[in-house]
Amino acid sequence: MERRHVAVVTGANRGLGRAVAKALAERGYRVVGTVRDPATGAAMRDRFAADGLSFDAVAVDVTAPDAGARLAAAVPEGLDVLVNNAAVTFDGFDLGVVDRTLAANWYGAAAVVEALLPALREGGRVVNVSSGMADEASLPAALRAHFHDAAPERAGIDALVSAFRDGVAASGEPPEGWPRSAYRVSKLALNAFTRHVARAVADDPRGLRVNAVCPGWCRTGMGGPAAPRSVAQGTASILWGTEVPVGGPSGGFFRDGRAAQW
């Protein structure tokens, strides 16, 4: 019997995460998705099942210390695709916003990847859902260089993120040269982490592919009704990353299947 493909999608309860989960299920995947509310997960499972699709919910916040372990336990057979989609954004700028944003978009996202990497099967793909706001070109040259220099080591990325957070804690404002956006910093860190992980698994015999993708500004609950792109367009951009073949690009940042500006 042919082995069934398995995908894990974080933040699967709404918006792009939900659309990606459904699209993968329609392609025959057993999809495991994170939701915050057990009732939401049960309702999604029932709706998917009514359409003949497979969906299992794990009710966990990606900021929880055991989130990665619980996801790994939900796929004892291993997985083929991880779509690291869960993220938050908040209005305003203060230390509370910075801490909540980094907890989900950086620390939680990185922890999920690290927990599930050992469970990826041959040809497995990791898709980190990033943002066009992670464009490094507009950063001061010194800061841009730091993000590239940090990419080979997780500790270096953590140090950069901590420097940003500590600056806000000390003065209420980011250190000189840093963007005044915790969301943007979290996605800059995620892109650097994507490069780090891709390099770390470059010689792995499983042929893993690790990429960041930008879905664009989409009309979701997070993006709002004024966004120029549809959910379908954003979903397609993410799904491209789930189909990168063995030997295909790894460690890159892509939008609609094309290399995006770092």
Image (cartoon, helix red, strand yellow):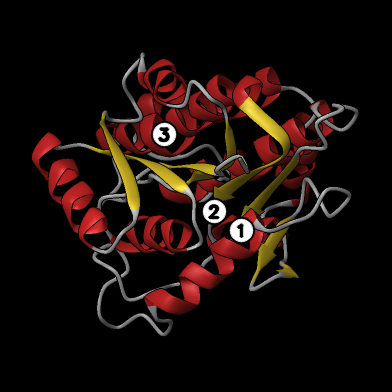
Q: Identify residue for label 1.
A: 213
- Residue at the spot x=37%, y=22% of the render? 67
Disc number lying in front (3 or 1): 1
The residue closer to the viewer here, 169 or 63, is 63
Amino acid type of the residue tagged 1 in the rendering? Val
Amino acid, disc 3: Leu
Report the front residue among 261 and 206.
206
Q: Residue at x 30, y 62 (%)?
A: 15
The type of residue carrying mark 2 is Ser
Q: Residue furthest left?
A: 39
Q: Which residue is mark 3?
A: 102
Per the model, the C-alpha gap separating discs 3 and 1 is: 19 Å
Residue 237 falls left or right of residue 142 = left
First in residue order: circle 3 vs circle 1: 3
Asked which secondary structure carries label 2, the reply is: loop
Q: Position of residue 223 (x, y in %)?
A: 32, 68
Image coordinates for residue 241, horizontal then vertical, percent: 65, 57
Quadrant placement of the C terminus:
bottom right
Question: Helix, strand or loop at disc 1?
Answer: strand
The N terminus lies in quadrant = top right
Image marks 2 and 1: residues in contact by CB distance under 8 Å: yes
Q: Position of residue 30 (x, y in %)?
A: 44, 44
Tell me, for residue 130, which label it has, or none: 2
Mark 2 and mark 1: Cα distance apart in space: 6 Å
| Image: 233 above or below 115 | below
**How far is the residue under mark 2 from the one under mark 3?**
13 Å
Question: What residue appears at the point 57 percent right and 69 percent down from the top-left corner?
Answer: 237
Label 3 Cα neighbours within 10 Å, binned few <14 / some 14-19 / many ≥20: many
Q: Which-is-in-front pick, marks 2 and 3?
A: 2
From the viewer's perspective, tell me whether residue 147 is left or right of residue 7: right
- Residue drawn at the location 15% of the way across and 42% of the way down: 42
Q: Earlier in the sequence, mark 2 or mark 3?
A: 3
